[in-house]
Image: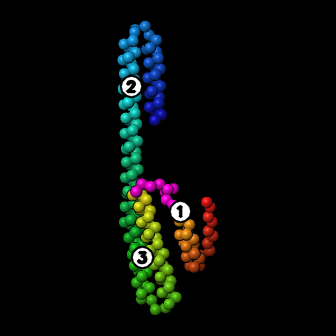
Amino acid sequence: MRGLLAAVAVVLVEFAVFAMMPTGPVPAGVLALLAAAVVVALWQRYRRAEREQEAAVNRERLRLARDMHDRIGRRLGLAAVQAAALEVRETDPERRAEARRVGDSLRGAVEDLHGLVAVLRGGEDAAEVDFDHAAAASLAARFIEAGAQVELRQRG
């Protein structure tokens, strides 16, 4: 954009210089057409570069979404299935409950991952996605149940 503005300034200065010359109105009209052509060409070039940049960003977002879904999603899904199998096989009630909590956490992580992938595929800004305060509190509670010390601070 800065280059476009500089080119327009140069053309306007040249137009002013040529307009003061005693050659008559024809060169000024020709210069005006030339200036308009230069401005249009530079604007089109700027817009094309802007579209190419947007397309590159979108391609990268889709690549990230695909990689996250394929790599992380597969592993989280497998771990959730393993936790469910452990829950079914376990005879100790406390260990069965722990396996259930692990499975619930993994299923929640899979859901979160699907949400992130949807944001990346849809092109939404992360800032546009609503923050779920209840989910954050629930996550903090699960960490506390697991024995971690957690401090949850909410603003806004």
Q: Residue at x 42, y 54 (%)?
A: 123
Mark 2 neighbour class, 10 Å CA radius: few under 14, some 14 to 19, many 20 or more: some
Q: CA distance from mark 3 to mark 1?
A: 26 Å
Residue 127 painted magenta: yes
Q: Residue at x 46, y 15 (%)?
A: 17
Q: Tell me which amino acid carries mark 2.
A: Ala
Q: Residue at x 40, y 73 (%)?
A: 77
Residue 75 visible in the shown view: yes
| Precedes in sequence: disc 3 or disc 1 | 3
| Precedes in sequence: disc 1 or disc 2 | 2
Image coords of residue 137 (percent x, y): 57, 71
- Marking on residue 131: 1
Q: CA distance from mark 1 to mark 2?
A: 49 Å
Image coords of residue 94 (percent x, y): 52, 88
Q: CA distance from mark 2 to mark 3?
A: 63 Å
- Nearest-to-viewer mark from 3 and 1: 1
Residue 64 visible in the shown view: no
| Precedes in sequence: disc 2 or disc 3 | 2
Where disc 2 sits, the SS reads helix
Q: Nearer the viewer, residue 108 or 73?
A: 108
Q: Tell me which amino acid carries mark 3.
A: Ala
Image coords of residue 153 (percent x, y): 63, 66
Q: Residue at x 57, y 79 (%)?
A: 145
Q: Quadrant of residue 75?
A: bottom left
Q: Give the residue number, with chain letter if any, for mark 2.
A: 36
Q: Give the residue number, with chain letter if any, for mark 3.
A: 79
- In the rendered view, would you say 99 is above or below 134? below
Part of the protein shown in magenta: 122-131
- Marking on residue 10: none
